[in-house]
Amino acid sequence: MIFLRQFAISGMLALAATASTLVGRQNVGPGPVTGDTFIHDPTVVKTPGGTYLAAYTGDNVQLKTSSDRTAWRNAGPVFPNGAPWTTPYTKGDKNLWAPDISYHDGKYYLYYSASTFGSSRSAIFLATSTTGASGSWTDQGLVVESFENSNYNAIDPNLIVDAQGKWWLSFGSFWSGIKMVPLVPGTGKPSSTNLISIASRPDAGGAVEAPFITRNGNYYYLWVSFDSCCKGAASTYRIMVGRSTSVTGPYVDKSGKQMTQGGGTQMMSSHDSVHGPGHNAVFRDNDGDVLVYHYYNDAGTAQLGINLIRYDNGWPVIY
């Protein structure tokens, strides 16, 4: 997910990646984006009115809006008066990480993370709003937390509603990898304490995070980021994917390797002036599925990347 965390991951991770992780599509440049283009760990929802609302990592969680998916403007913090309930996890820092925004039954749901760099003493919270505007959000409290001895990390949340209408939250960063927990529909809170493991990198320092699950046709797709974020133009982040016919997995890459064993098909990596693309989200629009992610430009500034996705023999293709 977010600014350099958990462990220092050297560029050698990319060199040590298995062949199965490198069977990806050719990198493509991001589509046109104008206005307030700085973003980190983006998530976007299309509003009922046809505009776009983005949430991203920043003080008290930050928002952007767009009327056309190209020109973006800053729209203020989710919590203008602060989020003091998060400070036991952030050690007083206002920076809240990796939100996940979606819209269900007339209400916006926003999951977000509170932690400190390198620590698994972390928590995921939920806020809701009927408008999505800055200052309109009501915090609904703690969803999942992790401790120093948990061997998983409660950050980088993503809500998926499956084909049967069941709600699930995936999350995780480093340690033993990506987890999933069932939720109560509507409340968005866990219905069980049992965690399902859906991805890990036991042979690569655990460097997997930022899960995002989508569905197209008969498949669910688990998008994750491998390697090291948050080093500006030196970042080695890259976007990976696997698929499954079940929302709970097992997710496999194109070679058939399970993502719980380090599998993943590479979808985008550093190229040209796009450095360390990762922490992606996907939403559906009139012209298809839309991929949003952050990358660093040559100056080391995090930028919003947007591309479209099509599907070829059941596998996503970024264009």
Image: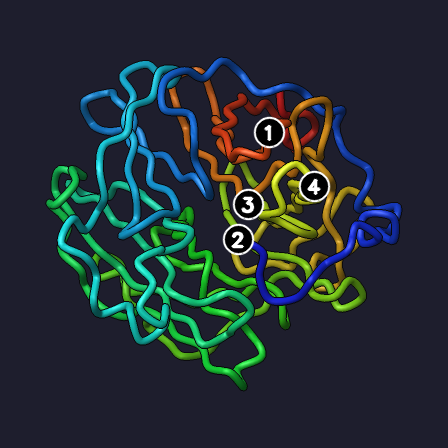
Q: Secondary structure at mark 4?
A: helix
Amino acid marked by disc 2: Phe
Instruction: Give the mark, 4 or 3, whose residue is nearer the N terminus.
Output: 3
Among numbered discs 4 and 2, the one appearing first in the sequence: 2
In the image, what residue occupies the spot 77% across and 34% down?
A: 24
Residue plotted at (48% across, 39% down): 281
Image location of residue 217, percent across then percent down: 53, 35
Q: Nearer the viewer, mark 2 or mark 1?
A: 1
Q: Pointer 2: what residue?
A: 3
Say left or right for 11 vs 236.
right
Return the disc, 2 or 3, that comes first in the chain's sequence: 2
| Label 4: few (<14), some (14–19) or many (≥20) C-alpha neighbours in 10 Å | some
Tell me, for residue 299, which label it has, or none: 1
x then y, percent, for residue 247: 52, 54
What kind of residue is marked 3? Tyr
Within 10 Å of disc 3 (Cα), the crowding (few <14, some 14-19, many 20+) is many
The label nearer to you, 3 versus 1, is: 1
